[in-house]
Amino acid sequence: MVLDTGATAWMLVSASLVLLMTIPALALFYGGMSRSKSVLNMMMMSFGGTAVVGVLYILYGWSMSYGGTDIAGILANPFDQLGLHGAITDSSGQFLLDDYGVPVIVGVAFQMTFAVITVALISGAIADRTRFGAWMTFVPLWVTLSYFPMAHMVWGGGALSGDGWFASIAEPIDFAGGTVVHINAGVAGFVLAVLIGRRRGFGRMPMRPHNLPLTMLGSGLLWIGWFGFNAGSAFTADGLAGLAWVNTSAATCAAVLGWLLVERLRDGHATSLGAASGVVAGLVGITPAAGSVTPVGALVLGVICGALCAMAVGLKYRFGYDDALDVVGVHLVGGLTGTVLVGFLSADTGLLYGHGPAQLVVQVLVALVAVGFSLVITTLCWFIVSRTPGGWRLSADAEHLGADKAEHYESAYESLTGGRLATVVARREHRPVTAAAEEA
């Protein structure tokens, strides 16, 4: 295999675009949707999660996902390429190349950013009430026990791949992460939202996004970064990457229209938050299907995802779970919708193209396995963190004060002069933060 510099350049750009999806895109999107007293904490969850996952991916995450010996179809041996040993150069010192002529180390960079964004997505479900230390304890547990195995099962030749449990029916399709990223993170967000509990005042007092321009800016950056996410999953600069790019944009545009139509019919007006959320819903829905549907199919998929997600975000009020920033309504519902619709809309194997129900059956089975796996693992991770000192929840006083001041001794918008330095000073003087809040 000869080095393909064009493909290599494309994959490096794609990896950078996917990293942009977390920092700053998701941080801005979630930060704007949160309350003003928790915006920095929300952004810190993205930054902190990125730092943890970036370290673990180099140490054993790559090996556990793609680089090691398969173990029961669930994971690869994390010790085979520990610290990326054997993933960079061969015995002669030449860089190892993949089947596309791209250095394997570039693939490591690309896949690392997928792990980063998946973990960060979960944080939106538990905004405003979670200790930062609990989050930083949860991240390494969950990415190790849920994300790395799921990546191996779907993309690394494991149980949910084309060589796995359902291969005799049809080859499962997950082009860029419907199961690995969005169903996985969406289920985790739902489990944590239920088990950690609701914010104090949820359902009784307004908890509106504090800065919608930030949210819209974040959604726009997510849209741009998603071209690396989906088109980059072609792993080279070719026609498939171009198809994925066009499908990604088509589905997103249609999803925005679908979301806004639901809002207009249901509420009497279309909102900027709806437009921003519709962008993400469309991006989520097309992720598993970007390389398998036609552009017209992408339009159909997008408008369905946008409409369903617009209706799903209200379920938290009906059923009483506090999914603060709509991770369940957008990522779980969107991921499930996109994954299942591949069975209908795949141009080569879909039911609507006359190819029978096999692909649809496999897509449903894979989605169910992904839901069950993430549910069990996330519950285990929640239990472990709940037994650590301090547990998951902010105290009542800290939640009232706001996670920014209580956890980070900072404020996003107040000028830290005079009395507003009280929180920081209180910490240095070993006084309760709540006392500092009264001074401020």
Image (spheres, rainbow, N blue to C red):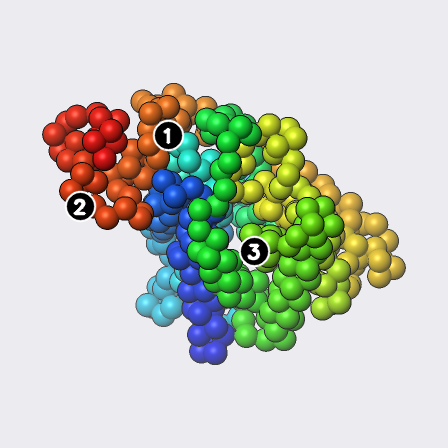
Name the image quarter holding the C terminus.
top left
Q: Is residue 166 above or below residue 92?
A: above
Q: Is residue 299 left or right of residue 26?
A: right
Q: Whole-Å distance between the Cαs marked 1 and 3?
A: 28 Å
Indicate which disc residue 210 carries. Answer: none
Q: Earlier in the sequence, mark 2 or mark 3?
A: 3
Estimate the x, y position of residue 14 in percent, counting from the top left. Answer: 47, 66
The answer to whether marks 1 and 3 mark residues whose Cβ atoms lie closer than 8 Å is no
Examine the image and state in which quarter residue 241 appears. Answer: bottom right
As shown in the figure, which amino acid type bears the numbered disc 1? Answer: Glu
The answer to whether marks 2 and 1 mark residues whose Cβ atoms lie closer than 8 Å is no
Pointer 1 residue: 399
| Category of crowding for the residue at label 2, using alpha-carbon neighbours closer than 10 angstroms: few (below 14), some (14–19), many (at least 20) | few
As shown in the figure, which amino acid type bears the numbered disc 2? Answer: Thr
Q: Secondary structure at mark 2?
A: loop
Any part of residue 321 in sight: yes
Q: Earlier in the sequence, mark 1 or mark 3?
A: 3
Pointer 2 residue: 417
Estimate the x, y position of residue 289 in percent, counting from the top left. Answer: 67, 58
| Category of crowding for the residue at label 3, using alpha-carbon neighbours closer than 10 angstroms: few (below 14), some (14–19), many (at least 20) | few
The residue under the point 75% across, 60% down is 300
Pointer 3 residue: 272
